[in-house]
Amino acid sequence: MDRIHVVFCGISHSHARAKLQVVRESDDFSLLGIFEPKDEARAKVDLKAAPFAGVRWFDSLDAAVGAGEAQAVVCEGYVHENFEFARAALQAGKHVHLEKPGTLRVEEFRELADLARAGKRILQLGYQFRYMDGFRTVVRIAKEGVLGDVFFVRGRISSDKSRYERQLRELRGFPGGVLLELGCHLIDQFVLILGRPGTVTPFLRTDYGNDPEYVDNGLSVLEYPRAMAVIEAAAMETAAGQRRVLEVQGTNGTVVLSPLERPGKIVLHLDEPAGGYDKASHEIEPANTPRHVGDFAELAECIRAGRELTFGLDHELASYDTVMRAVGLDTTALWA
């Protein structure tokens, strides 16, 4: 089967190296090259070592997205760069994998969605938990009614205080700070389970550092007709990875995934038998699915088949809307 030719635009995001490695190791893709406009970003990589060894570097964005054989563009720059990359790619008729959240300007995300829909191109956001087995199991249990009527979802995803200064430099001035950077991945799961919420109320604070431009302690409450969801993120925990959690409560039981990955652990409690599970407590061991592999595998499959992703454009719009409202932004322009 012919490989899909792909270009990377930007390598500044922390996920860029891992995604480049996935693409280069995949039998589905062939890397044509990278466009990175910043000299300092290129200077930080070892051009003789994987995943950058032997890579072609494009001189301009137009050259990268205009490469005739390119079918898809992966946008992994800083958040303020990625809109330009993605728009140029969609205008050139390419499919796009876009690092989350895509852009902080709601009208720009609407423009990308309109371009993708009009051109019948894929626009895939890089929320990293979508294809991991632990999360897919929790979402399936919730959506299939195993828990009864879901009335509460909670997610906590924080980082260690040892990373505080680096995150301060990277996220200063971002709406929601750490809640945007980390919490968005779990908010995406909330939308998969419950859909787009009604009212969203954020609580955005600076409680550890002294710079009010960096939100280091955030919480948002999402309200639905008969349910609530709460997302929490802080930038100054100890051993934060061990306490990251996704919890779903329903009228027939509760399912908890914690820690979230590598590979994570699922505990299911049921009042009555449902979905093939007995009335009992169950421990479920998810498969150790790595980040990003499933995203790119389905991207390749959908490009070849000419079909929409499992998480299609309607979901991307609902997820983006919810993430933006969770950090206090007005999303009216998204639906205008």
Image (cartoon, rainbow, N blue to C red):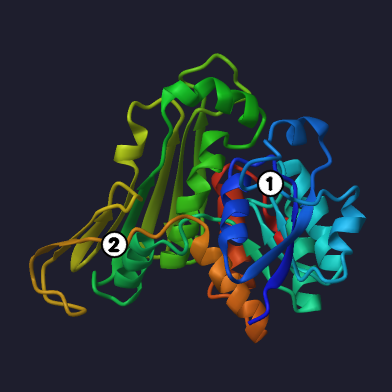
Query: Would you call the spot at circle 2 few (<14 residues within 10 Å), some (14-19), or many (20 or more)?
Result: many
Residue 194 visible (yes or no): yes
Q: Quadrant of residue 47?
A: top right
- Image vertical order of residue 61 relative to residue 122, above or below: above
Mark 1 to mark 2 CA distance (whole Å): 34 Å
Q: Residue furthest top?
A: 210
- Report helix, strand or loop for mark 1: loop
Q: Which residue is mark 1?
A: 53
Q: Residue at x 52, y 49 (%)?
A: 184
Lateral position of residue 84 relative to residue 50, left or right: right
Q: Point out residue 289 in the picture as x, y percentages from the top left corner.
A: 39, 60
Q: Point out residue 69 in the picture as x, y percentages from the top left corner.
A: 83, 71
Image quarter where the C terminus lies is bottom right
Q: Quadrant of residue 4?
A: bottom right
Residue 336 visible (yes or no): no
Kind of residue at disc 1: Ala
Q: Point out residue 25 in the picture as x, y percentages from the top left corner.
A: 57, 60
Question: Looking at this view, is 294 or 103 the one in front?
Answer: 294
Lateral position of residue 324 relative to residue 57, left or right: left
Q: Point out residue 178 in the picture as x, y percentages from the top left corner.
A: 53, 35
Q: Which residue is mark 2?
A: 286
- Report helix, strand or loop for mark 2: loop
Lateral position of residue 14 relative to residue 336, left or right: left
Q: Residue at x 25, y 54 (%)?
A: 265
Question: Looking at this view, is 155 or 325 the one in front?
Answer: 155
- Image vertical order of residue 233 relative to residue 129, above or below: above
Lateral position of residue 39 relative to residue 188, left or right: right
Kind of residue at disc 2: Pro
Query: Would you call the spot at circle 1 few (<14 residues within 10 Å), some (14-19), or many (20 or more)?
Result: few
